[in-house]
Image: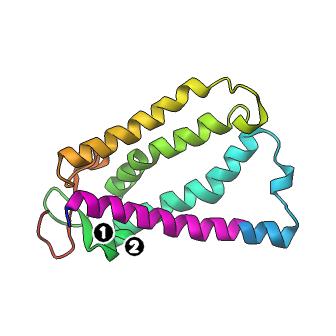
Amino acid sequence: MKLTVKRLLAYGLDFVLLASVLVSLQWTLYLVTGGFPFVRFDAGHEIELWVLLTFSLPVWGYFIWCEGKKQQTAGKFFLRLKVVNAGGAKIRWRQAFLRTLIRLLPWELTHLIILVPEPWWTVEVPENECWIWVPNVLMAASIAVLFVSKGKKGIHDFAAKTTVVSAGGDRG
């Protein structure tokens, strides 16, 4: 299987794992508390803060810890991939942070655009809907760079000076 496809599948597995765990926790909280805190949220900034605390921060922590400590997320583990620095060794924490910052920037921008100042589902025409193209272009560019590099580097790898290799150590 090509490295590009393996990386995309690994990211997809990580997404499914994280979404399953975090949505299950939120659903459990909703059921146990009779809707609190969800029924209290009115303003976009309140929802954005909730998303930040209960989704974004755990996801950031997952990627930073897994790649900084173990060189791989669960998705990379299952597809036998790992992230390394330019010398082929374990990456530094700041590299793990930078990879995560750039990789998840489109998702964070999407949250902000859709939720602030008012959630899109509460208004007839969102005032900031024209900005939704920005995270979409960033995601498309990230995928394009991954294909051009034959899976070895995404935009976040170029910025952090990292590469993804097979867990056995061979490049590609």
Name the amino acid type tagged 2: Ala
Q: Is residue 132 left or right of residue 169?
A: right
Q: Which mark is residue 95?
A: none
Mark 2 falls on what kind of element?
helix
45 vs 95, nearest the viewer: 45
The residue drawn where x is 32% and y is 46% is: 143
Percent x, y of residue 150: 17, 52
Q: Which region is colored magenta? A: 3-26
Q: Which residue is mark 1?
A: 71
The residue drawn where x is 31% and y is 47% is: 156
- Mark 2 or 1, closer to the camera: 2
The residue drawn where x is 33% and y is 38% is: 141
Give the position of the N terminus as an image quadrant: bottom left
Marks 2 and 1, how far apart in space?
Answer: 10 Å
Q: Is residue 31 left or right of residue 161?
A: right
Percent x, y of residue 63: 43, 62
